[in-house]
Image (tube, grey):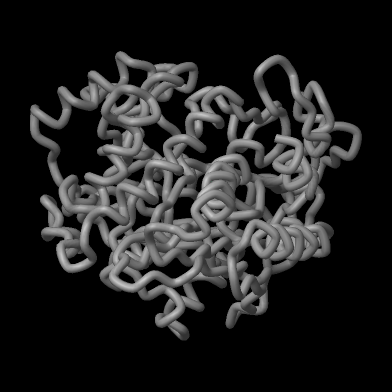
Amino acid sequence: VRTLAELVRFPSVSAQPAHRQDVGACAAWLVRHLARIGLVRARLVPTPTGGPPVVIADGPRGADAPRVLLYGHYDVQPADPRDGWSDPPFAAVIRGDELRGRGASDDKGQLFAHLAAIESWLATEGRLPVNLRCVFEGEEEIGSPGLLALLRTNPDLFAAEAAIISDMPMVGPDRPALTYAVRGLVGAEVTISRATGELHAGLHGGAVADPVLAACRMAAALRDPDGRITLPEFYARVKAVGPAERAALAQVARLGGGPGSGDDGAGEPSFTALERTTIRPALTITGIAGGSVGADGKAAIARAATLRFDLRLVPDQEPRTIMRSLARHCAAFATPGLRVRFVPGAAAAPLVLSREGAALAAAGRAYTRAFGRAPLWRRSSGTVPVAAALHDRGVTPVLAGFALPDDHIHGPDERLHLPTFFRAIETSLALWEELGAGHAATWQAPPPAEARP
Ligand SMILES: [Zn+2]
């Protein structure tokens, strides 16, 4: 835990250029740690996009053992102490049975549970039951651009039968879970600006176009009062989910795996809160800016207004089609007096995995050994771009997280529940053994139950 706290103390915020050095220092720390626990060829691999490097290290080679990637990310979301943190976000202090700090759960704690187990294997057995390659990226919180580019330019780095991805919650402290679906993502930022700049609201109000009002209308027109997204054809490819799977989701929600306090009844009324955040797509305006307020307020028609969109997609929606449709919606708000600039952001395809195959079965047995209980199957509301990208290249993603629903990830007072962390280490100890027990030749996963685009 002391060593993990060292890792959490790096403010490795990938979204903020001011933290660029901290991100680099965190990567360098990981390389040293990986070498120290006995992994070989621990190194920094630059990405084609010039962002933070990918940390790669290998286990000792064993003939006849499956090749397994261990994926994690060492970057974190921004953390502003003024957002209501009880302790400084990068102090990594222990409160009761929790380690507090940005990244303690997402994803440094989950990543480190595996490293503790690997260290133990190497110290006691001098080997690992699989041919392991660690791949830790520093840009997950900004959409993984560098890692995804590296996957395209250097696919051999990622050649493996399976990839262990521990960057998601379980259902509860005693309820381990395997994740079999993640939502896709379309992000974009659009700026509406006046061709002739700011104007006096009294002299010109009523005669000229108002970018803030146009931005409000642009946003408001995207959702009807029932929470349905109004982009044309938006639901055309959304797959219906059958009653058996909906019943299983209801069971997960009853056990605490739903959005919990994040449910205030908004959204499509014919779906439960967990369904609205997993099997249904969503649109969020994550930011809006324009004009002036408070002490800086001016009686002026603003020069510009900006909106930031976040859409989550489900099978079989296609990010490219949705991005185009969103861009068309925004462009329609251009007038002789208003320019619209649409900047596409991150895009990722939704993914539904087969719930069969040797790698997932091995993970299921590992959870059962550590928690005394078989894992539940859950769908994630979030997006893991690397999972779909690896899946496309024939690597079976195993989405086996250790976070808890109330770890406050991305929020103030993020915490890692230490008793769960210790069981995560036990799970990882068993996982490598279970993965190695199956023969590589039997690893070809069957095609997904639900085909993806
Ligand atoms: Zn994460």
Residue 143 in the image: state x and y as whole percent: 53, 60
- Residue 284 as seen in the image, left or right of residue 182: right
Q: Residue furthest right?
A: 295
Q: Residue at x 26, y 34 (%)?
A: 377
Specify whether residue 151 is in view.
yes
Q: Is residue 253 left or right of residue 49?
A: left
Quadrant of the drawing holding the N terminus = top right
Looking at the picture, does residue 373 appear above or below residue 245?
above
Residue lying furthest bottom = 153
Q: Position of residue 113 (x, y in %)?
A: 55, 42
| Residue 224 visible in the shown view | no
Q: Residue at x 41, y 30 (%)?
A: 170
Q: Position of residue 5 (x, y in %)?
A: 75, 39
Q: Nearer the viewer, residue 386 or 65?
A: 65
Residue 206 versus residue 136 in the image, above or below: above
Q: Position of residue 41 (x, y in %)?
A: 61, 75
Residue shown at 48%/60% (left/top)?
Answer: 127
- Rendered-image quadrant of the C terminus: bottom left
- Can you tell which quarter of the image residue 37 is in? bottom right
Camera-side residue of 98 and 22: 98
Taking depth in this image into account, of 20 and 295 the one nearest to the observer is 20
Count of residue discs: 0
On screen, residue 214 above or below 345: above
Closest to the observer, 278 or 322: 278
